[in-house]
Amino acid sequence: MSNRAEVVRGFISKIRAIDIESSAMKIQMSKKMTKSSDLRSVRARRVLIKGKPLVSVVYRHDTRDVTKNYTHIDFVVLCSEWMESQFFNATLTLDVVEHKLLSNKKNATVKSTQTRGALAVCDLHDRQKSRLIPEDTPFLRSLGISSDGGKVYQASQGKYRQINKFVEILDGLCVGKSIKTVADMGCGKGYLSFATYSHLVTLQKDISLVGYELRPKLVTEINSIARLHKLSGLSFEVGDISQIDIPKTDMVIALHACDIATDVAIAKGIEVGAELIVVSPCCHKQIRKTMKGNPRIVSSLSHGIMKERMAEWLTDAIRALLLESKGYKTKIMEFVSLEHTSKNLLITAEKTKVRSGALLEVAALKKQYGIEEHYLERLI
């Protein structure tokens, strides 16, 4: 019997011994064994549904998340299957102790450490959607999103859904990575900065997030809110993102940075070698202004709305290809409903290796649509 089999058996015993009636717990499985599998990770936590203790499991696939609830007995069986054929690593948190299992095909080790605070049990009710940033999170009130009673204002529902979806996506991207430093480029009022920091600090100790914003008065205001809520690793600085030099950073984010500001944010992330770059573009003026009338497509570009949408598609497609040419694996997805905002695309980039041929594809697109230069090319 290999060392791994013995260690995993002991780890499963810890899960089996959990008193599901009274103990809070959460589990994360990561580092998949089979590269072809689209199941990236599994996260589970003990919840109460109608007063009954169950284990809520989130299966994170490449393109979707699936949530299912299990009894403790069924969950233990699933854990054995996952550790046998799906995942090398696992983290089990029980109240104030974290057990981390790291393994390969033959060997495994478990390290146990004390956590900063006790886990809370999530009480789920019928028809109540579980959010990573709950409605009664204190900073939401200070930012004007929720009332003193901890309820999100009707006018802020769209923004609330938006930041929760963004954080949910980041949650999946961070699985198996050590993300300790984050830069929010053009943070505005800081909605995303506060949400990202408050969630990431539950996954990784010693998180530091810096938001950059042009308006000094606004920076002073949101720094005061961060101090009020004792978010010690969250801070904001005055700066033009096109002019500042950011330090080595694990993740760069930007929500609705207008036009070429998105390119600046991407370029800064590439420059510092960020493990993750996540941006939601806003307007796409630069490409729209430079698109020329290729004879084969000139008639379609004569319609303003078609030219606008084509410019959006081209701008973000070329951004993804340029990221791939610099060693990032990219995805472009919708992250909020079009009903809320038309600015609903998200580009995610995970540092891996250079994809050969990406620049040739950029050149082909530019030639096809009569584009002289994409602004991001100038920056990288």
Image (cartoon, grey):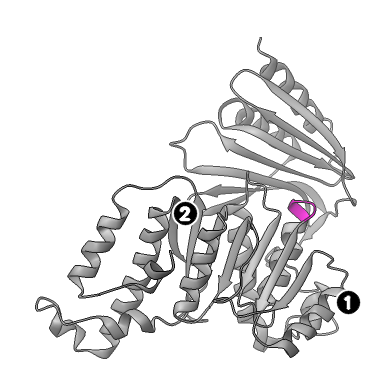
Residue 247 horizontal/vertical position (percent): 65, 61
Give SS at disc 2: loop
Q: Earlier in the sequence, mark 1 or mark 2?
A: 2
Q: Is residue 231 left or right of residue 35?
A: right
Question: Residue 228 bears which disc, if any?
Answer: 1
Q: Is residue 121 left or right of residue 342?
A: right
Is residue 277 highlighted in magenta?
A: no
Query: Which residue is painted at 60% across and 53% down in the image?
Result: 172
Mark 2 surroundings: few (<14), some (14-19) or many (≥20) residues within 10 A: few
Mark 1 surroundings: few (<14), some (14-19) or many (≥20) residues within 10 A: few
Q: What secondary structure characterizes most of the magenta part?
A: loop
Label 1 amino acid? Leu
Query: Which residue is painted at 44% across and 45% down in the image?
Result: 353
Q: Quadrant of residue 83?
A: top right
Residue 204 horizontal/vertical position (percent): 75, 51
Which contiguous range is marked in magenta? 202-206
Of the pair 6 and 238, the residue shown nearer to us: 238
Q: Quadrant of residue 41?
A: top right
Query: Which residue is painted at 10% across and 75% down in the image?
Result: 296
